Amino acid sequence: MFVPPERAGYDRTPVMYDPSGRILQILYARRAVSQGTPSCGILFKDGALVAGRRKISALLMPNKKVFQVDEYIVATFAGYSSDGIFLVEQARDRAATLRFVYGSEKPDVYLIARNVSSTMHQATLYAGLRPFGVSIIIAGKDLTGSHLFFNDPGGSTVSWKAGIIGKNSSVGEEFLMSIFKNTDLTNISFDDAIKYAIAAISVASGSMPMAEEIEIGYVKDDEPATITTANSAEIKDLYSAATEVFNEWKAKRKTGEEETEEGTEETEE
Amino acid sequence: MFVPPERAGYDRTPVMYDPSGRILQILYARRAVSQGTPSCGILFKDGALVAGRRKISALLMPNKKVFQVDEYIVATFAGYSSDGIFLVEQARDRAATLRFVYGSEKPDVYLIARNVSSTMHQATLYAGLRPFGVSIIIAGKDLTGSHLFFNDPGGSTVSWKAGIIGKNSSVGEEFLMSIFKNTDLTNISFDDAIKYAIAAISVASGSMPMAEEIEIGYVKDDEPATITTANSAEIKDLYSAATEVFNEWKAKRKTGEEETEEGTEETEE
Amino acid sequence: MFVPPERAGYDRTPVMYDPSGRILQILYARRAVSQGTPSCGILFKDGALVAGRRKISALLMPNKKVFQVDEYIVATFAGYSSDGIFLVEQARDRAATLRFVYGSEKPDVYLIARNVSSTMHQATLYAGLRPFGVSIIIAGKDLTGSHLFFNDPGGSTVSWKAGIIGKNSSVGEEFLMSIFKNTDLTNISFDDAIKYAIAAISVASGSMPMAEEIEIGYVKDDEPATITTANSAEIKDLYSAATEVFNEWKAKRKTGEEETEEGTEETEE
Amino acid sequence: MFVPPERAGYDRTPVMYDPSGRILQILYARRAVSQGTPSCGILFKDGALVAGRRKISALLMPNKKVFQVDEYIVATFAGYSSDGIFLVEQARDRAATLRFVYGSEKPDVYLIARNVSSTMHQATLYAGLRPFGVSIIIAGKDLTGSHLFFNDPGGSTVSWKAGIIGKNSSVGEEFLMSIFKNTDLTNISFDDAIKYAIAAISVASGSMPMAEEIEIGYVKDDEPATITTANSAEIKDLYSAATEVFNEWKAKRKTGEEETEEGTEETEE
Amino acid sequence: MFVPPERAGYDRTPVMYDPSGRILQILYARRAVSQGTPSCGILFKDGALVAGRRKISALLMPNKKVFQVDEYIVATFAGYSSDGIFLVEQARDRAATLRFVYGSEKPDVYLIARNVSSTMHQATLYAGLRPFGVSIIIAGKDLTGSHLFFNDPGGSTVSWKAGIIGKNSSVGEEFLMSIFKNTDLTNISFDDAIKYAIAAISVASGSMPMAEEIEIGYVKDDEPATITTANSAEIKDLYSAATEVFNEWKAKRKTGEEETEEGTEETEE
Amino acid sequence: MFVPPERAGYDRTPVMYDPSGRILQILYARRAVSQGTPSCGILFKDGALVAGRRKISALLMPNKKVFQVDEYIVATFAGYSSDGIFLVEQARDRAATLRFVYGSEKPDVYLIARNVSSTMHQATLYAGLRPFGVSIIIAGKDLTGSHLFFNDPGGSTVSWKAGIIGKNSSVGEEFLMSIFKNTDLTNISFDDAIKYAIAAISVASGSMPMAEEIEIGYVKDDEPATITTANSAEIKDLYSAATEVFNEWKAKRKTGEEETEEGTEETEE
Amino acid sequence: MFVPPERAGYDRTPVMYDPSGRILQILYARRAVSQGTPSCGILFKDGALVAGRRKISALLMPNKKVFQVDEYIVATFAGYSSDGIFLVEQARDRAATLRFVYGSEKPDVYLIARNVSSTMHQATLYAGLRPFGVSIIIAGKDLTGSHLFFNDPGGSTVSWKAGIIGKNSSVGEEFLMSIFKNTDLTNISFDDAIKYAIAAISVASGSMPMAEEIEIGYVKDDEPATITTANSAEIKDLYSAATEVFNEWKAKRKTGEEETEEGTEETEE
């Protein structure tokens, strides 16, 4: 549970520890993440996907929640969108450099994720900067297979099988855990991955979003990345399947919508 | 609703999060925006427009509220005018560079909007700077069609169909929503767009401004941008039509003039 | 009305917004301006003028209140004189550069005014600087006609028809408004412009200054700028006429000398 | 015992001593270390090893707790993982440079450890930085034999025979001391070293972790470094042996699980 | 009258305005000036002089109070002597540069005074500096005649006919005003100028200093500058005459020695 | 006696004097020194030595307390070991440079000591740094004979005959003074020097350390420096002799173990 | 008398004036000087000398209190010795440069003194530095004769006939004044100068130091500088003479040993 620090002062800069060794500005930045709309990522048999919920309004073009980083790499984020876009653009530049310098057709996904998290880490090392208020999920394929990386405001990169960020992410995580605890996640089918991703976002959202609100990006088999929405022809049926999963989950636990406090887990190893 | 932060100190710099993950200096900068005279933008069938209310005084040359950025791009802003001019001039430089470097006759509107929002974002990343106290609406046409972008003090760029900024922008937004919720906004006619833009500004102003107080910039069909005022020959009739719309709206809701508190929405995704 | 900020701290640097979106150090800098001796500017039929009240003392050379910027450009300021001279010298350098680089016989007045206000704006963007404690009025002619620009400590440039800065400028502005509200200001004669400028300064001063205390700079027709004083041969009679205007005004409103609180208007659009 | 400093203020920056000569930010950084999962290192007859406990979850790829630095060098850390990775990557760069510049097949382990601790030391010398919140154990072989170095957030490098860092490291240290106080540590066998390393981690963890949770890296005889887990074929039996040692220890002292306060020892000589 | 600012904090740096638009650090620097021994300057028919009171002690070489800046330029100051010497040396460098670059036999006195005041102004613009705690009087002749300039800690240059700085300068100024209010100051003789300068310093000192305590520097007719003391052959008689003037003044007003509070006049125009 | 400064604030940075002219951060850094294990240095007939007490533990390689700087130069320190190593490495670099640049076989010991103390002094001159928390003793021979230098956190270099630093150094100093007050220190034999060094460290330690805990470095006659421990063949007997001296001292004064407060002596001349 | 500033805050940095125009950090630095052991300087008929009291201890090489700057220049200081050595070394560098660049056999003493005081002045102009805590006396001969300069922490250079710095310097100054008030100081003999210098140091010390504690440096006639002590052959008799003078003085005033408060005189002119 998140406890606001009573002793004011330790939480003013990312270059100050509090007496228990915490860097509070990083914790606060994670709070910014936990207020964004949910995004998730899942690794499946021959690929990886990210999905997120975008805002639909009569006055807005649908906002982007999934971004193409390179031919075989997609990303999504939760938190301050301007920080997110900044980092996505850096990831694109890095991918372009890798292609140019190393002549690699499929740039290494870990190198790109580390390049982004390295920038995020720098922002926790120097006074006069602030940690980035955003978490990023990067999914892609390279010469070593499919990958799904999660970058935290503290600057760490974690290799995921599946996960969810943003508002009520702990409930979404609970849902994913209940599905996957007995499954070899890396062996689930593309269809299952999409279905559970949509369901996880719905669980975190507390209700089923409209199909067009869910944006999905994936890399599969040997094809370049696809970015689409849940009301597209190929996803529509999976959206329906996800609705069922969501309803089952909801039925099973009446208390699932309660907002859970989160964001205090520190990334220590 | 905007709540002034009791715990002083978190709101002193854009590089400090408060315990709930907010960057208060960005919220305060949005308050500067919400005190400027209203400006709006609307995308229509074959183009896009921006419009704003300028000050008319016997002792002043009418001040500029709409600015030409490039042959096919116009902009308006609300907030601190010196910050706004600074960013408009940057947008002009960027457009000139794009023409020079890429030889493009119609520079890409998104690239220009992103260049401006990137500068605005930088001002939220480093201690010793302040967020820009201005929001900017950029409308234009390029090789990919018509575009309308909104830049926020936090550094994000949002792709709009229609929107309004400045004093009482939430009332103006309510008006626009009531008109457009059942319309495919990208298909409305130029005349309707002008009419509703004038009406929206009037709604936010609380009363109908004089025709000469409303400055309008638009790109339409294949013609370069035009900047004019509502008392010009071609707009005069639309101003009258807008007056009717305004009166209907006012009649419908007696409470429309109440000032609504705003400015606390954070741009998280 | 100016209200001193109770919550200390928001007013320590120009890179901090207070919770209502104001940058208090800029407001305070405007207070420095509002304590200087009055200066005014008026645009007339074929030219523009600035005028100001200087100090006369047996021990001092009469101080300069009007400055030549270029052959066809003059300026005056109110506030901290050392800040003012600094900016006037920058304006002169800019004019010289424009002549040298562009070979223009008459450098563009707006470019020079913007160059100065840009420097003033920078001083509101970075910590460790202070806004300039001075407002400047620049009058001049160039290839596009006569111009009168006002630069504010916040960094904005406003195109004036007529205006007044310094001590009691709001009373002076009231006077100018009463004279000009029914006049096309850009069409008044040189003689009227001089007369009203002297009267406006007298109104702001609360009493008629001696003729030699009023310094005037103007550009008229195709002649280079002239800087003179109100006791010179060509102005003497207009000074007498201004005295009459001043007495009428004083008679009309007994309450005209009351000092009016000012300086809180923010330059938002 | 750690006593939080009452007189606030001395603990805000690594460039301030408190009145008793302590640099509190370094002590706080050590608290971050003492909250990480445990890692240990042991020197044995013809080699050296590091081992650590990693997190296993259905949703995560098993996280890395042991890292290859060079062909004959491995490392582990406890504390903020992003700080740890940053320093491990620096160690890799340093090793590569040593190879390139000096043509050494086996880069000097001390030089690499010092290079890392030097960076950690710099972070305690300048305002505007923070000490690294991580301790690192580096084990390796070079032309001068086997080495085991411990780097502290304060920037010191200590040459270990055996040691443990992270949560409850003082209990783990007590265990190691009880085993080794009468042994010439540099002469124990590889098998014993592995067994006691696993047992020490278990003691600090308070219970026996699953075999796959324990990651081990070692250099032995003339072979390049091996990184494996305790459920691998060659370690499995040693894991069982360690379980026995752990149970004996636990039986011997009922109070072994009590968390001991630590982290205040300063590295003074 | 000087009122110490109650609201602590506005007076900590020259880059902060107080709510009434004052820069308090500049006012405080003027207080340093008003505690120095008095110096004065007077313009006369064909020249200009500065004079000041120096300290005489058995243990010291008589300290310098008047400095040669260039062949035809002299200077004196009141306030922190190390700041004064620093600026005098800068003035000398500037004069040398003007000679070298422009080949002028008599460098322009205003350019040199402005160069010094420009440095003094810079020290009021940036955080991390302090205003210079010194006022300087520069007297000299150039191609445009005789000049007497006064530089203030705020960075302004004022063209004087006569004036006095340092301890009790307001009493000295009162004396000068009583003498010169009905005189065309620029037409007084060299002898009168010397006499009144000595008397003014004596008035500010409260009693007649010894002749050797008064150092005088002047430029006259076409001769290079002379620096001498009041006990020299050519000044001795004028010192006696000044003693009479001083006694008359003292007789006229018994209250002349009362110390007058000063230093709060801001240099606004 | 050390008195903690009541008026908080003067002790936050090495660039601030307290009202009595003390730089408190330097005093605090000396407190760090006075908590390290003791080290001493003694000049003898044809050489100089340093000695210190190191930590012995079953889990650690014996830590280094004496360091070789150059062929004929050794050093020891007390305080933060990471600061000490940093400065020892700088001393080594300086020695290597002196050899390379000046071709000197025996680099000048004073130049090396001054180079180190100069770095230590810099750290007391600039904000944003902290004084080094370490004192260093450097012993060596060069073309001008044997030398023993002591460097203080304040940046001064003192030429010693004998001295001791670290915990209870004042008791150790008392012991050395009692031995040497009637001796020409520079004429004592190597054996006596070793004996008294071991005894002094024991006196400061409060009890006799084990022979292997005492590390000794010396330069003697024309031989390069030797670094050894008190349990080595050539020192063993001297250790026994020292034990006797220690016991005598202890017998003589029962109160010798009382810890004496120290660290406030400022190095003023 | 020194009064500690009640209003905390004005005394934190050398770039802040207090409301009465004082720079308190400079006053505090002078307090550091007034705690050093006394040093003095005297100008005599054909030369100049400095003398100071050094510490003698069985454990120390006698510390240096007088330093050779150049062949004909010597210096002494009181205050923080590390600051003093830093500045003496700078003086040496400056002298060497003057020799090299200008080919002068006897570098100008004033130029060297100014170079040092200029560095001391810089340290009072910028935030993040501290004034030097030392006063320096420089004595020497050059082509213009003998000179004796005193440099203050505030950065001023004063030309002395005689003077004393350090502990109880005001009592020492009183003594010097009593001796020299009726003497043409520049005409006293070398022997008298030495005698009075020793006596002045003794007066400030409160008792007669041992002859070897007094170090003396002088330049006389055409000979290069000599640095010696009061127990040397040529000074011994003068030391005896000084003892008599001291005893006379002590007899004359029983109250001479009372410590006098000092250090608040500001160097204003």
Image: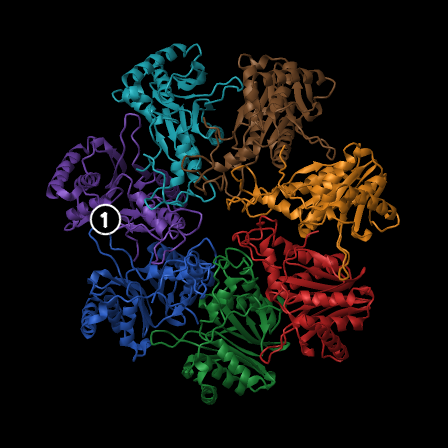
Chain colours: A green, B blue, C purple, D red, E cyan, F orange, G brown
Looking at the picture, which amino acid does disc 1 mark? Lys
Q: Where in the figure is residue B105, as x and y percent of width and height? A: 41, 65
Identify which residue is drawn at 33% across, 69% down: B222
Identify which residue is drawn at 56% across, 45% down: F4
Instruction: Determine the image quadrant of residue G21.
Output: top left
Instruction: Determine the image quadrant of residue B177.
Output: bottom left
Q: Where in the figure is residue A183, as x and y percent of width and height? A: 59, 86
**Towards the viewer: E110 or E234:** E234
Does the rendering let one see residue F73? no
Q: Where in the figure is residue G141, as x and y percent of width and height? A: 62, 20
Q: How many marks?
A: 1
- In the displayed structure image, the side of residue G155 where residue F267 appears, left or right: right
The answer to whether residue C123 is above or below residue A250 is above
**Towards the viewer: E13 or A64:** E13
Identify which residue is drawn at 34% across, 30% down: E261
The answer to whether residue G92 is above or below residue C246 is above
Identify which residue is drawn at 46% across, 53% down: B128
Q: Where in the figure is residue C133, as x and y percent of width and height? A: 35, 44
Q: Give the class, few, some or many, for how many residues have Cα within 10 Å of label 1's Cα (few <14, many ≥20).
A: many
Q: Quadrant of the C terminus of chain A?
A: bottom right
- In the displayed structure image, the side of residue A156 where residue F241 appears, left or right: right
Does the rendering let one see residue F140? yes
The answer to whether residue F55 is above or below residue A112 is above
**Towards the viewer: C75 or A59:** A59
Q: Chain of mark 1?
A: C
Query: Residue under circle 1?
Result: C161
Badge 1 marks a residue whose secondary structure is loop
